[in-house]
Image (cartoon, rainbow, N blue to C red):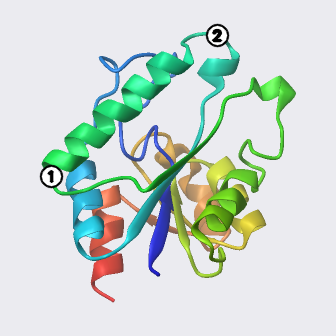
Amino acid sequence: MKWIVLDRDGVINHDSPSYIKSAAEWLPIPGSLEAIARLTQAGWRVCLATNQAGLGRKLFDYDAFAAMNAKMQKLLAERGGRIDAVAFAPEHPDHATDMRKPNPGMLKDLARRLGTSCDNVWFVGDSETDIAAARAAGMQPVLVLSGNGEQHRAAATAQGVASYATLSNVVDELLSK
């Protein structure tokens, strides 16, 4: 089985320092949905692993989070794509569990749910916490420069982590192999 894990905010959709709090605020990064659709159509399982501290901070509720994901899935379906599994950490950062990145809990949980391992699986994120979670889970971290990625580029490069401008560029690389 070919599978990949993506962070959400800053990788698939535009991020905001004041959080994405509603479906109306959830806006895809150009080309990201088409990139996921290309993976889906090539037989990849696409999973999502996202910290959602806005839930723990009570900036939005679970219904709003579900509406954001429903909007994403609807827009993906219109392009022939889908997210196969979603893992998220709703807790406040001050009360983090093993599920919250940079811990590997979400990634290991996705592998368990899929009945596979994390070995050689790419985790695409836009932050050092994404890189740390991927490493802790035994995955291959990949940085995109969209979202917060540019701020973390030097650290990623120093750690030998490949970086790409966008998710679409990551998918180009994966599908060329």
Q: Residue furthest left?
A: 78
Q: Which mark is residue 79?
A: 1
Q: Label 2 crowding class (10 Å Cα cut-off): few <14, some 14-19, many 20+?
A: few
Identity of the amino acid at label 1?
Arg
- In the image, residue 76 above or below residue 122: above
Q: Residue at x 39, y 46 (%)?
A: 146
Identity of the amino acid at label 2?
Lys
Q: Residue at x 65, y 74 (%)?
A: 118
Residue 14 visible in the displayed image: no
Q: Are marks 2 and 1 in contact (CB under 8 Å)?
A: no
Residue 13 visible in the displayed image: yes
Q: Nearer the viewer, residue 64 or 162?
A: 64
Determine which residue is flagged by label 2: 58
Q: Residue furthest bottom?
A: 177
Q: Label 1 crowding class (10 Å Cα cut-off): few <14, some 14-19, many 20+?
A: some
Q: Position of residue 138 (x, y in %)?
A: 72, 73
In the displayed structure, does residue 42 sit left or right of residue 106? left
